[in-house]
Image (cartoon, grey):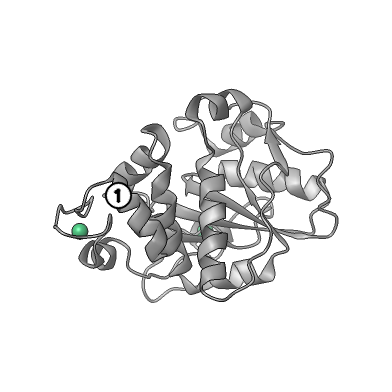
Amino acid sequence: MFKALTQLSRHLSGTCQVCGRWPAQPLCPVCTQRFAPLQPRCTGCAARLDHDHHGLCGTCQTRATPSAVQHCVAAVDYEYPWDSVIARFKFRGEPGWSGPMAELMLGVPQTVALMEQCHVMVPVPLTPARLASRGYNQAWELVKDLRRQSAAAGSVPPPGLADALLRIGDAPDQHSLPREQRMRNLQGVFIVHPAARLSQSRVLLVDDVTTTGSTLQAAAQALLQGGAAVVTALVFARTPPH
Ligand SMILES: [Zn+2]
Ligand SMILES: [Zn+2]
């Protein structure tokens, strides 16, 4: 993990990228403790829960249809400062953030359990056009760093399959749509690669952010239709409850 941080810090000067403290790694320990505290989250959708709660959040408890994602884990809430870190990670050509982000994800005990329990890690894919213009899939960068850091810590990480899932379309902007419509929009967006052998496997889906969970649901449904036995999900950030 320190290697990843050192590599990144060469590009990002010697200051904490959140508070500006110098000298520091891209994320100083003070900011990590302040903005990425371990907290109880819904096991279904990773939404932050009140401290005296555990298990499923109210939304997950009242789902009309069973979730395609058996268990979802997130490291942080999708808000300051992580929203701007993620914007730099995916929109401003700074893939080196995957190192510090993977480190925060591996700091969540449930992440380690999800990785131990799965057979393969699969990133949520971009469309070929988006991948070509960005030059990298940020979710795959996270998979690679999660595996690298986990191996450096002495574990045997599950293999990663960059192309197990293909994205054949982009949904229109989803934010203003009701949940049902969001799901409809995403139907047919993901397909399993014809050569991917997922039969009876436990798949861990990885993405940088989940907001409504619709993308993870659609990707998980495609994986289940493609033969996966169980799909779990690991994201860096989850939109906090309103
Ligand atoms: Zn800091
Ligand atoms: Zn939930």
Q: Which quadrant of the structure image shows residue 38?
A: bottom left
Asked if disc 1 is less than 8 Å from ligand 1, the answer is: no
Left or right of 55, for residue 31: left
Count how many numbered circles sit on residues in the image.
1
- Residue 129 percent location from the top left of the image: 58, 23
Q: Look at the image and tell me whether residue 167 can be seen.
A: yes
Q: Position of residue 174 (x, y in %)?
A: 50, 31
Q: Residue drawn at (27%, 58%), measured in percent from left and top?
A: 27
> Quarter containing ligand 1?
bottom left
Judge by depth and name the residue closer to the eye, 47 or 200: 200
Q: Which x, y percent locates residue 142?
A: 51, 51
Most foreground residue, 116 or 55: 116
User: Whole-percent x and y of residue 153?
Assistant: 51, 74
When asked about the image quadrant of residue 113, the answer is bottom right
Q: Is residue 40 above or below residue 215?
A: below
Badge 1: few (under 14), some or many (20 or more) residues near its Cα, within 10 Å? few
The kind of residue tagged 1 is Arg
Figure check: 78 above or below 29: above
Look at the picture and state if 61 lies above or below 190.
below
Which residue is labeled 1 in the image?
10
Answer yes or no: is residue 48 visible. no
**Left or right relative to 8: residue 231:** right
Quarter of the image where the N terminus is located:
bottom left
State left or right for residue 198 relative to residue 85. right
The residue located at (72%, 31%) in the rendering is: 188
29 versus 188 height, above or below: below
Left or right, residue 58 beside residue 26:
right
Tag 1's secondary structure?
A: helix
